[in-house]
Each structure stands twice: as C-alpha cells, then as structure tokens.
Image: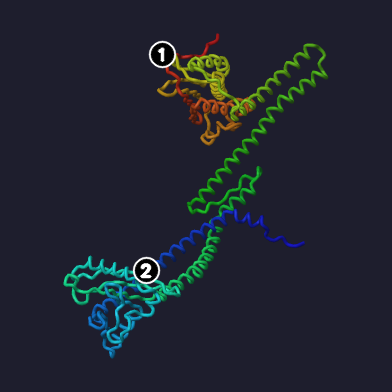
Amino acid sequence: MRPRGWGKRDIRRMMRGLRFRLTAGYAVFFALLLIMVATGFREYLRSTLDAQSRDDLNEEWAAVKGGFLRFFNSPELGWYATWYYAEDDPDETTAVLDIKKVYLVTDQYGKVLLDGETKDRQVSSEYEDIGIDKPSDIQARVRKAVADFKPNTPNTPTWMIRKDSTGARYLIRCAVTFPNASPYDHGVPFYVALGTPLAENDKILNKYTWRVFIGVIPGGLILGSFLGWIMAGRVLTPVKEVAHTAQRISGSNLSLRIPARQADDELDYLILTFNRMIERLEASFQQMKQFSTDVSHELRTPITAIRGQLEVALFTAKTTEQYREAIYNALQDIDRLSQIVRALLLLSQAESGQLALQKSHLDFSQAVQDLVDQFQIPAEAAGVHLSAHLPARCSILGDRVQIDRMITNLLSNAIKFTPEGGAVRVSLRPAENFVELVVEDSGRGIAAEHLPHIFDRFYRVPGSGTAPAPEQGLGLGLSFVAWIVKAHRGTIDVESTLGKGTRFIIRLPAQGVGSDSVEMVVEPVRRA
C-alpha cells in the first residue's frame, strides 16, 4: 500500500489552523515592517545623495563666481566668455574640467556665448545631448532674476532633472549672474547652467534596492516566518493540552485537570476557566447520577408496593372488602407516583420556558396568611410553633398559583426540618421598591459548604432534617422556589447556622404598598 501523502484537504486544514494564521500574521507584520524600514532608509539615502549632488553644484557655482569664468565684450565677437585658471595648478585644472563636463553659458536672450580664445561655443557635448534650454525659458528666468535682485544677496537658482538620449538622468542648476555690475547700474546679465550626472546615485540606489528588497527582505521574511512558526507552536502548547484533556474527559473520568503554568497570563486564565468548567460538569454529573438513583428509588418503591398489593389481592383476597383495601392502597401509591412524575414535568416545563406566568394584582399578605393557616395543623402535629407577622395589606404583581407553591415549599421544608419544640416564623416587610418575605426556623441549620447548592435541581443536603430519608423528597422544592422568584424578577438569599436554624429572604418587586401600618399576627391554633 502506498503511504498516504499530503492532499488538498490536509493543506486546507493546516491553513485554517490557528498556528498557521498566527504565523501568517507574524510574517505579514514582519514583511510590512521590513518594507517600511527599507523604504524609509532608501528615501533617506536618496535624499542624502541628492543633497550631496546639490552641494557639489553649489561649490562649482561658487568657483564660477569666484573668477574661473569671465565675460568680455568686443566689436568682433560681441559678448564672449573665457575660462581663467592656472594650468600648472592641478586643483584648479581639475575643478575647471569638472565644471566643463556639463555646462551651458548664454547671454540674456538665450544665445550661447563663444570662448574668447578657441572660439568654441560655451556648452558641453553632454549638455547638448540633454538639450539646450529654450531661449524663451532663459529670457523668463533672466527677467525673474532681475526683478528679484537684491544687493549682496545671491539669486535663487532653478533646479531641474533632465535626461539625455540614453535615459541617463542629470541634475541641472540654472542661475543668472551679473559679473560687471548690478542691474541697477545697467549691468549685463548672463545665464549659466551647471549639471552633474546622477548615474552613480542611481546605481547606488538600484544596488541598495536589489540587495535589500530582493535579498534581505525575503531572507528576513523566511527567518521571521520560521521563528513565528516556532513561537506560535510554543504559545499554543497549553491550548493543545486543553484540547487533549478535553478528548480524554468522559462521564466516568471528570477528575482530570490541567496544571497551571504559573505565568498569570491569558493562557493561565483559559486553563483556570477550563478547570472550573470541568468542576461544574463533574458536580452536574454527580447530581444527575444522584438524581437517577433517587428517582429510581422513588419510582421503584410505589411500583413495588403496587405490584405486591395487587399480587397479594390476586392470590389471597377472598372478600370484596379485601379487594377494596388492596385497590385503595394501590391507588395511594399510584397517586404518590403521579406526584413525582408531575413535579419532574412541571420543573422541566418551568426551566425550558414552557410554563407561562399568569400575573395579576395580588394581596401578598392575604396569600401568606391563608397558607400559614393551612400549615397550622401539620405544624402542631410536628410540635413546631408557627407564627407570622404581616402588614395589613401588601400588593404585588404575581401568579397566585406559583406564589402559593413558593410559600408552600418554604413552609413545608421549615416544618419538616425543625425538631419538636422548635419555631417557624414568617414575616412580610414592605419597602419602597420591593416586598421582603422572610421564612426562618430554629432547626439544625445547613452547613456552609452546602449553601451554594441548595437551589440546584435534585440537590439534597446529606443527612439533613429530622425526618426519615424517603420523606425528604427529591430535592425539587427549592429549585421551584428559585425559579418562581426569578420568574417574578426577584431575588432570594439564604442564611444558616448549624444548630441555630435557617433563614430564607425573598425580595419581590412591589406593586403598591399599603399605607396602613397595622401588623397582623397569626398564631398557631390551639387544640383541646
């Protein structure tokens, strides 16, 4: 079998990977940085070379003004120009020869002057190749120089970039000089243009461009991409560990945790968040497992009882009364089974949003009073003193059925888990923007480690209460309470101390608080 190689799908998967995208980002950023730096340095180099060329031409102009070039007038030649320098002086000879490589000398009308000795025209062959300035342009520059003339102030030159027939570039410095006198003294102006080739400058720039943009930048980009690939791999290592750990996690293996890097950075925060998520999942799985056990037990008990009673009636019952008793006991167990299923279905509908509230204006004080009256008999049977301190009137906007279920669950739990001789107190206090309901008991209390979970679905405090375990229910009551409070946009808090009791505090938005401050005290009914 031929070994499998890289296909298009593998390449696309790699390109969609975070490591590749990070590396590509590094490469693009590094490339842009290198290009910007290289372009900036190239511009600096170009401006430096240009400034050097201008300085050279300014020095040549100073030499021309210093006396190397002199102007004369004769009947035969008219105005002409002659170069004066010591031929036996190598410095002067070199300076004049450099000036005469690219130059042009004309009168104020644009006519090229002659050399007084050789009768040659005062223009170099290189300048002729560039193209002699048009007489109209020369005359315009002369007029401007005359108009702008200031004593003891050099006139401003004109700078141009010209090209010869081969495309080679030249920097040209054009200026007007008044060798004999100022224009105010009827001095004659002359036009002098000096040039220098820019071929060497262009060669340096081209060499720099090729070496940097073709050699250095691609090499730096390859090196930067390689380093970026390595850095991205090191940065993503903890992320891969998170992914590998997540792959190993299952319902029976939720104890895995990723060790923190102790770097206190974003990746450590990711690891911490992931570990906390696993802790929550583990707690949820434990609750669901416990719920499955509890539901199985709660459902098995009535089903077993029903089956046993019916079997006994089938095989042993002889009279109508025996059959009636067996059917009656079976119906009681069926009713208990129905209550369990109905509670699970109701909570599921509530949490999924399928159970809509039917809100209306409700006298909260009257609702609490009615339920306290109903619970007086079971409270007395349990030996618990049940009392309520309520305002004469207190209105809220709520669902009467759900509000009754909330109060019923709280009173039922308080009485169930309060030992004989204890007390359960219910109080209602209206405030400016909310109504506060407090249900407190003198029972055994709840340990601090269980308080954050008592409103969780199916959660039951281990070993709580004085009642036998089967009578503790499925742990759905407080889940209902929490949902009802939340559905009414209220808040619920719990305070508990072991050995002293538990206090539930519910705050619901007020819907008109009565001004009557008369307090109604409900005491337990005394039976003879």
**How far is disc 2 from disc 1 in space, using C-alphas?**
94 Å
Write down the quadrant of residue 140 in the picture: bottom left
Q: Residue at x 35, y 74 (%)?
A: 53
Q: Residue at x 58, y 44 (%)?
A: 278
Q: Which secondary structure lies at badge 2?
A: helix
When the figure is inspected, residue 285 is found, relative to residue 192, above or below; the finding is above
Of residues 92 and 297, which is closer to you in this image? 92
**x and y, in percent, of residue 503 in the image:** 49, 26
Q: Are marks 2 and 1 in contact (CB under 8 Å)?
A: no
Q: Residue furthest front?
A: 76
- The earlier-in-sequence mark between 2 and 1 is 2
Q: Which residue is mark 2?
A: 47
Q: Could one spot residue 431 in this view of the protein? A: yes
Of residues 108 and 65, which is closer to you in this image? 108
Q: Residue at x 53, y 51 (%)?
A: 260
The quarter of the image holding the C terminus is top right
Residue 145 shown left or right of residue 205 in the figure: left
**x and y, in percent, of residue 420 in the image:** 55, 21
**x and y, in percent, of residue 171 in the image:** 36, 72
Residue 486 shown left or right of residue 74 in the figure: right
